[in-house]
């Protein structure tokens, strides 16, 4: 089987496709540049611009064969061979653009794992599904309908679900722009669902290209596409706004001591500084009769008693101190999203009180405290140490529930 690349518009459009990919990725928000999975996911999101172009090219190739009556001239020729021959130039152009995107996002030299290659497989599968279905449409429809229809529908399918509910629908498209922070891994469902949908699209295309009666062919193709959608939806329906799951503790690097510190392997360079700062904070708080958790970790989970933080490889001592102190204040409870949350009034005061007790010096982030928080902390500072600890315990408990109001000295709730 030979291929005449000179007659394919895919070769002419390959450089513009690369250029569009570059501009698309230049405007992407991006994740941590040092985290390989995040950079691969951002690069894979370029399917939003590559897939519509590939779909248009594939539809044009299919329409060209339809117009030339190739199937009638060579009835013994296998439809699969025709498809492969027609889509080789489009596949090459898509591969060049996608490879360029991966290369651009990996220029920072982030660490990669073998399991991260699933992102590449998923992106390739999404492009294959769009191109094959568009080719089949081109074989059955006039070029004036097939080509623009393929481009528009391909683009809408990738970008429109981002704006609709339920949220998990967006994870069936292969658009991974919200993956991943250093504490995340790509959810298996987010990689599998787009591949299942592409499989349904390819099966539907095979039916459309078959020689069965047109009415039966159209019905069977619609059923195949619907089945692929239904299975993909079943797989993706457990996902939320992000296509991620918590990263496993096997990726942690730990350092024993007081406290024990466990950070992601990409952050191993700041382990000594995090441990030294956490130890200093713990010593200052113990001097005031307070305790800190025995383990500092970046892992998310349900294990109690952990001092959960999130650092970066370039974090300064001041950044690390701020992160550690903020991590001692509980995050918003789940009930706060649905109900009134009186504890919010104590957040700033509790954080400021802890910072003034445990910070090495008066850091800049304390300067951002509100006047109300400052008045409250000044009033607390006039109390005896046991009364201050009681104030802290009472308000700490109020921060973790929606039923318990905080006990503030200067604010009447």
Image: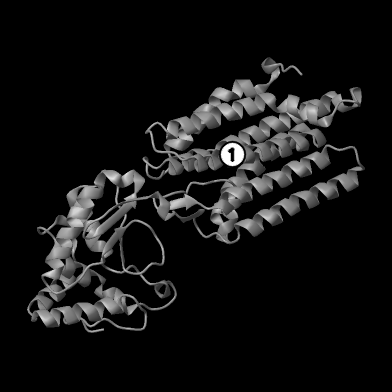
Would you identify the image quadrant in which residue 234 lies?
Answer: bottom right
Point out the image quarter for the C terminus.
Answer: bottom left
> Residue at left 44%, top 44%?
38
Q: Position of residue 91 (x, y in %)?
A: 65, 28
**On the image, which quarter does residue 135 sit in?**
top right
Left or right: residue 182 compared with residue 291: right
Q: How many marks?
A: 1
Q: Residue at x 40, y 31 (%)?
A: 107
Residue 289 in sight here: yes
- Placement of 285 over or under 45, stated as above or below: below
Local packing at callout 1 (Cα closer than 10 Å; few below 14, some 14-19, many 20+) is: few
Instruction: Residue 28: give x, y in percent of width and height.
Output: 44, 41
Q: For this view, does 377 lie left or right of residue 330?
A: left
Q: Is residue 275 or residue 321 the one in the foreground?
A: 275
For mark 1, give the secondary structure. helix
Location of residue 49 by image quarter: top right
Q: From this viewpoint, which residue is outermost toward the front? A: 256
| On-image quarter of the N terminus | top right
Give x and y (percent) for residue 332.
35, 70
In-front residue for pair 69/116: 116
Q: Residue at x 12, y 72 (%)?
A: 288
Query: Is residue 17 in view?
Result: no
Please name the residue that numbered disc 1 is placed on.
121
């Amino acid at each position: 089987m030979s291929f005449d690349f000179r007659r394919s518009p895919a070769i002419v459009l390959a450089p513009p496709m690369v250029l569009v990919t570059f501009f698309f990725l230049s405007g992407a928000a991006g994740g941590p540049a040092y985290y390989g999975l995040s950079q691969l996911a951002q690069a894979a999101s370029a399917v939003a611009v590559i897939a519509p172009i590939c779909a248009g090219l594939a539809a044009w190739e299919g329409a060209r064969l339809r117009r030339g009556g190739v199937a009638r001239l060579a009835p013994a020729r296998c439809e699969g061979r025709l498809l492969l021959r027609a889509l080789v130039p489009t596949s090459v152009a898509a591969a060049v653009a996608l490879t360029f995107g991966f290369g651009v996002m990996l220029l920072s030299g982030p660490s990669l794992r073998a399991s991260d290659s699933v992102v590449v497989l998923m992106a390739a599968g999404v492009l294959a599904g769009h191109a094959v279905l568009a080719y089949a449409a081109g074989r059955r429809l006039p070029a004036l309908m097939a080509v623009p229809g393929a481009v528009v529908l391909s683009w809408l399918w990738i970008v429109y679900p981002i704006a609709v509910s339920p949220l998990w629908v967006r994870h069936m498209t292969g658009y991974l722009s919200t993956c991943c922070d250093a504490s995340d891994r790509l959810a298996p469902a987010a990689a599998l669902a787009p591949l299942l949908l592409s499989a349904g699209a390819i099966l539907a295309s095979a039916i459309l290209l078959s020689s069965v009666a047109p009415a039966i062919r159209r019905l069977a193709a619609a059923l195949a596409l619907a089945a692929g959608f239904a299975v993909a939806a079943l797989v993706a329906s457990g996902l939320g706004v992000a296509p991620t799951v918590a990263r496993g503790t096997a990726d942690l690097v730990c350092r024993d001591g007081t406290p024990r510190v466990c950070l992601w392997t990409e952050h191993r360079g700041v382990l000594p500084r995090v441990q030294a700062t956490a130890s200093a904070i713990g010593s200052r708080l113990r001097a005031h009769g307070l305790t800190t958790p025995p383990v500092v970790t970046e892992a998310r989970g349900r294990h109690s008693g952990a001092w959960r933080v999130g650092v970066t490889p370039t974090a300064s001592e001041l950044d690390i101190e701020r992160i550690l102190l903020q991590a001692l204040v509980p995050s918003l409870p789940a009930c706060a999203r649905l109900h009134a949350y009186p504890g919010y009034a104590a957040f700033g005061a509790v954080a400021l009180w802890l910072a003034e007790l445990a910070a090495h010096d008066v850091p800049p982030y304390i300067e951002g405290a509100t006047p109300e928080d400052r008045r409250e902390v000044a009033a607390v500072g006039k109390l005896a140490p046991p009364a201050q600890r009681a104030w802290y315990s009472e308000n700490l408990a109020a921060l973790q529930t929606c039923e318990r109001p905080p006990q503030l000295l200067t604010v009447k709730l």
